[in-house]
């Protein structure tokens, strides 16, 4: 019998098309000639990084995620950040919305309860951000004049396929967030 190929997966939220356009333009304006821009179709915010799993575990992850209850929310990326050790330029939140934190923490807790080992930077340790470019060199960043906003109404289980040029992402399943009136 052949070897079972492991799959590298994570949970994420994806910006809508308008937000993708703004984020791609931001990255293009700030990355410089040395920076490697993230492809617009790959722009995402990771909720929980799981890592390598078997196909059977992918099914288990989908069952766990389908049981997570969280509300839809508006996300506003209102700050730029830079991690110099890896040259990563990113957009994030000064004050991450509570529903985003609760979603990431609920998901991480459900995965741990099922015996899955997840990345320590997941859940409550989450620094919500979208990577815009890699290999960037910059001394300072401008203030983000206009926040990038979108309505988050679902989250997804995503497979990451690493290539030399860039990672490719494939959505394996999406899970709706409950629509709760803010009134």
Image (cartoon, rainbow, N blue to C red):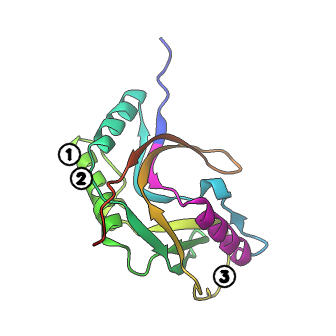
Residue extending furthest top? 1
Q: Residue at x 35, y 53 (%)?
A: 177
Along the line of sight, which residue is nearer the eye, 3 or 44? 44
To which quarter of the image does residue 116 belong? top left
Residue topped by disc 3: 138
Along the line of sight, which residue is nearer the eye, 56 or 68? 68
Residue topped by disc 2: 109
Residue extending furthest right? 33
- Left or right of residue 157, residue 101 in this image: left
- Sequence-wise, the earlier of marks 1 and 3 is 1
To which quarter of the image does residue 99 belong? bottom left
Q: Position of residue 71 (x, y in %)?
A: 31, 59
Give how far apart the Cα atoms at labels 1 and 3 are: 41 Å
Dot 1 and dot 2 residues touching (CB under 8 Å): yes
- Indicate whether residue 86 is drawn in magenta: no
Q: Residue at x 41, y 31 (%)?
A: 54
Q: What span is in magenta? A: 9-31
């Amino acid at each position: 019998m052949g070897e079972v190929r492991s799959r590298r997966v994570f949970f994420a939220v994806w910006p809508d098309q308008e937000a993708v356009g703004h984020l791609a333009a931001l990255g293009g304006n700030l990355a410089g000639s040395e920076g490697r821009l993230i492809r617009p179709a790959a722009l995402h915010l990771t909720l929980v990084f799981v890592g390598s799993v078997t196909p059977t575990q992918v099914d288990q992850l989908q069952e766990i995620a389908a049981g997570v209850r969280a509300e839809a929310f508006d996300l506003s990326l209102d700050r730029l950040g830079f991690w110099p050790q890896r040259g990563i330029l990113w957009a994030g939140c000064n004050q991450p919305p509570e529903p985003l934190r609760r979603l990431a923490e609920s998901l991480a807790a459900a995965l741990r309860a099922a015996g899955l080992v997840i990345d320590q930077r997941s859940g409550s340790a989450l620094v919500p951000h979208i990577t815009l470019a890699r290999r960037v060199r910059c001394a300072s960043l401008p203030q983000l004049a206009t926040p990038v906003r979108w309505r988050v109404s679902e989250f997804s289980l995503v497979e990451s396929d690493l290539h030399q040029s860039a990672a490719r992402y494939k959505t394996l399943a999406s899970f709706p967030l409950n629509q709760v009136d803010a009134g």
